[in-house]
Every structure is written in structure tokens, then in C-alpha cells.
């Protein structure tokens, strides 16, 4: 439940930061071209939109960092709980992968090959 809530907030923050970055003007662009004259100076205060949008972007970036960290903690807890679910350990898998020599009759039959059994090119 809590993980889903954090994930939803994370996605909303990501969409908001994308929108904010697209709203901001580049260094060479004039604010009058985007907002229609000098109206941008009165909407965001005397300094214009740079400081307001910059601060808001920084706050949203901090929120993205916090939700990313929280999602990483949830993922770590989920990975630890998977280990308790009966999945075999790496040592058990490695020991099962080693070849077993339970069939001595095959080993003995393999040693009975003679030179006549080997094909020779003439």
C-alpha cells in the first residue's frame, strides 16, 4: 500500500519536473517571446520566472530523490523477503550442478574400449 503511494507520487513528480523544464527558457531566449511582452515580469514578480521556476524545479528534484530512495528501500526489503520464500541458496545450486558418479557400470563400460572400436581412416 505505502509502496504504491510512493510510486504514484514519484511518477507525478517526474511529470511535473518534465513540464517545468519545458516551461523554462534557454539562456539566449527572451521571456517576452513566450509570454507576450512584459507580462512575464508581473506574473512571477520583479525578477521574472527564472528564480520561481528554478526554485520549484529544485524542490521537485529533491522530491524525486526522496521517492527514489524510498522505492530503493522497498525493493531491498522485497528482495530479502524473496530469499525467505524457499528459493534455494547459491551453494545448494552449485552443489547440485556438480556431476554425480552414481553409475559405476557406465564407468567400467567406458574403459573397455579397444583399438578396434576406434574408426581409422585408410
Image: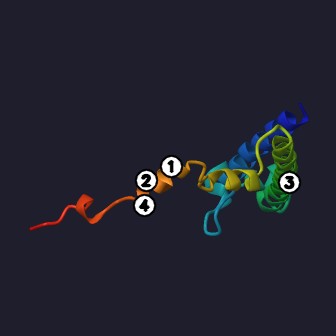
Label 3 or label 1, whichever comes before in sequence order: 3
Residue at the far right: name it: 2
- Is 103 in front, or is 71? 103
Give residue 94's quadrant in the image.
bottom right
Q: Position of residue 86 (x, y in %)?
A: 81, 38
For disc 4, the marked residue is 111
Q: Position of residue 48 (x, y in %)?
A: 79, 59
Q: Is residue 16 left or right of residue 67?
A: left
Please tell me whether mark 3 or mark 4 is closer to you in this view: 4
Q: Do the residues labelled 4 and 2 touch (CB within 8 Å)?
A: yes
* Numbered mark located on residue 69 in the image: 3
Please tell me whether mark 3 or mark 1 is closer to you in this view: 1
Residue at the far left: name it: 122
Number of labels in the image equals 4
At x 81%, y 41%, the residue is 82
Q: Is mark 1 on a helix, strand or loop?
A: helix
> Could you give the CA–CA distance between mark 1 and mark 2, rounded to whole angstroms?
6 Å
Label 3 or label 2, whichever comes before in sequence order: 3
At x 13%, y 66%, the residue is 121
Residue count near mark 1 (Cα–Cα under 10 Å), binned few <14, some 14–19, many ≥20: few
Residue count near mark 4 (Cα–Cα under 10 Å), binned few <14, some 14–19, many ≥20: few
Please tell me whether mark 3 or mark 2 is closer to you in this view: 2
Label 1 or label 4, whichever comes before in sequence order: 1
* Numbered mark located on residue 109 in the image: 2
At x 80%, y 60%, the residue is 54
> Could you give the CA–CA distance between mark 4 and mark 2, rounded to whole angstroms?
5 Å
For disc 1, the marked residue is 105
Amino acid at each position: 500500500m505505502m509502496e504504491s503511494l510512493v510510486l504514484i507520487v514519484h511518477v507525478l513528480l517526474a511529470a511535473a519536473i518534465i513540464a517545468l523544464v519545458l516551461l523554462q527558457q534557454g539562456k539566449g531566449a527572451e521571456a517576452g517571446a513566450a509570454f507576450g511582452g512584459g507580462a512575464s515580469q508581473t506574473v512571477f514578480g520583479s525578477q521574472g520566472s527564472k528564480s520561481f521556476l528554478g526554485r520549484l524545479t529544485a524542490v521537485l528534484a529533491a522530491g524525486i530523490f526522496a521517492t527514489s530512495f524510498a522505492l530503493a528501500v522497498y525493493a531491498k526489503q522485497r528482495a530479502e523477503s524473496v530469499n525467505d520464500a524457499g528459493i534455494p541458496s547459491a551453494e545448494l545450486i552449485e552443489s547440485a550442478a556438480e556431476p554425480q558418479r552414481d553409475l559405476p557400470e557406465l564407468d567400467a563400460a567406458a574403459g573397455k574400449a579397444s583399438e578396434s572400436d576406434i574408426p581409422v581412416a585408410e
